[in-house]
Image (cartoon, grey):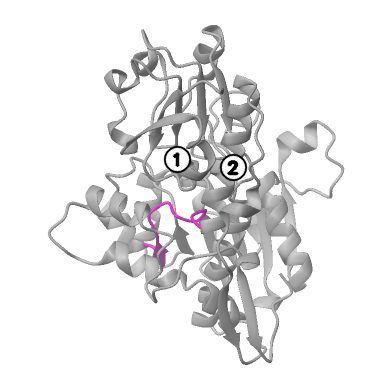
Amino acid sequence: MVKKYRIVVDQNMPGIDELFGDFAEIVRSEGRSINNQILRDADALLCRSITQVNRELLKNTSVKFVGTATIGTDHLDIDWLESQQINWANAAGCNAAAVAQYVLSAMAFWSKLKDKNIKNLKVGIVGAGNVGTELARCFDLLDIQYLLCDPPLESIGDNRPMVSFETTFKCDVITLHVPITDQGPYPTRHLFDRANLSQLKENQLLINASRGAVIDNQSLAKYLSADQHTDVILDVFEGEPDVSIELINQCLLATPHIAGHTLEGKLRGSWMIFQAFCDAFKINTTRKQSDLYPQANQVSLMNEDLTDSLLALYDIQSDSQALRTDNSDPVAIRFDHLRKNATQLANGTVRRDYSGWQYSGDYRLPL
C-alpha cells in the first residue's frame, strides 16, 4: 500500500484531488498565507509564484519536495533547497501556449484600435525559451514576421537566427518573455530602463508578460506621462499585488498577471508537478494527463478576419476592464481576486488554449 503523504497545496492549483487523492492528505491554503506552521508535518509543498520558498518558510519542517506549478523559479531559494536535500521541480513550458495566446490577443486588440493589419506587423520576441518559441511557432502558422532575441541562448549555441536587443526596437511590436535575473552577462532586471524606454516610438506596442521588474515601473510611469509614447500592455508589475493604480491607468491594457491562466495551462502545471512528485517519492501511477481535461469549448468563427477570431477566443480587454473597475477594495485585493478567478471569462466561458476550442462556421484558425 502506498504511504499516505501530507501535501500542502496552493488552493488555486486545479486537478490536485484527481492526481494525488489516492495517496495523499491534501491541505489547501491561499498562496500568500502558506507559512512555517502549516508545513511542520508536511511531506511536500505545491505552490505558485506568490509563495516565497526559503529557509524561513521551511526550517524545522519535514518537507522533502517543493513543486511550483509555474515557469519561473525566482520565488524559490534553490541553493538552500539543494543544500537541505529537498527535491524541487517547476513546470517549465506549462503555460507557454496560454501566454502566446495572450500576446496574440493583445496584438489583435492593438491592430484593430490602430487600424493596422496584424499580418503586416513585425514582432520582436525578447526571450526565446518555451514561451518565445511557442509564440514564434504561432507566428509561423499565421505568416506574421518576427525577430528572435536571446543573447544567453545564442551564447550557448542556439542556431536559430537571432538579433541584438537594440534591433528589436525597430519592430512594430516588442514582447518580453525572459526570466528575472540579476547576475551574469545578461541581467534582465530593469532591462527596459529610462534609457531604453526613450528609444521607443509612438507607433509601437510594448508587451510585458514575463516578470514585472523586467521593466523599471517608475521610469515607465514617467515615460507614459509624456505626450508622445509607445503603447504599453502589461500583465506583470513590480510590487504585486500592491501595484500602481497610476501605472495601470496609463497602460493601453493592464491585466493581473494572468497571461498564462488558461485551463490547460493550469492543469498542465499540476500534471508536471505530479510527475516530478512521483519520481521523487518513487510512486508508480496509472494516471493520464488527458483524463484531466473537459470537453472542448464551442465557438463559431463566421469570417476570415484574424483579429476578430483571436479576440473571439480570448478578449483581453475584458480582463483589463475588470482590473480597472473602481470599487471599494484596495487594488491588492482586487488584483489577487481577479488572478484567482482568471480562467472564468466575462462571457461565462472558461479560458482555454487554442487546442481547447472546437470550431464551427466558415473559418478555422490554423493554430
Residue 351 visible in image:
yes
Q: Camera-side residue: 313 or 224?
A: 313
Say if 63 sits above or below 142 in the image: above
Residue type at mark 2: give it. Answer: Trp
Q: Is residue 78 magenta?
A: no
Say if 79 sits above or below 349 in the image: above
Q: Camera-side residue: 26 or 169?
A: 26
At 55% from the left and 70% from the top, the residue drawn is 105
Residue 142 location (% of width, % of height): 74, 72
The alpha-carbon separation of the residues under discs 1 and 2 comes to 29 Å
Q: Quadrant of the N terminus?
A: top right
Q: Quadrant of the C terminus?
A: bottom right
Residue 207 location (% of width, % of height): 52, 58
Q: Residues within 10 Å of mark 2 (few under 14, many from 20)?
A: many
Q: Which mark is residue 213?
A: 1
Q: Camera-side residue: 236 or 186?
A: 236
State the SS at label 2.
helix
**Magenta span covers which residues?**
251-262
N-term-proximal mark, 1 vs 2: 1
State the SS at label 1.
helix
Q: Residue furthest left?
A: 328
Tag count = 2
Residue 126 placement, left or right of 216:
right
Residue 127 placement, left or right of 261:
right
At 33% from the left and 15% from the top, the residue drawn is 40
Residue type at mark 1: give it. Answer: Ala
Pointer 2: what residue?
271
Q: Main secondary structure of the magenta part?
A: loop
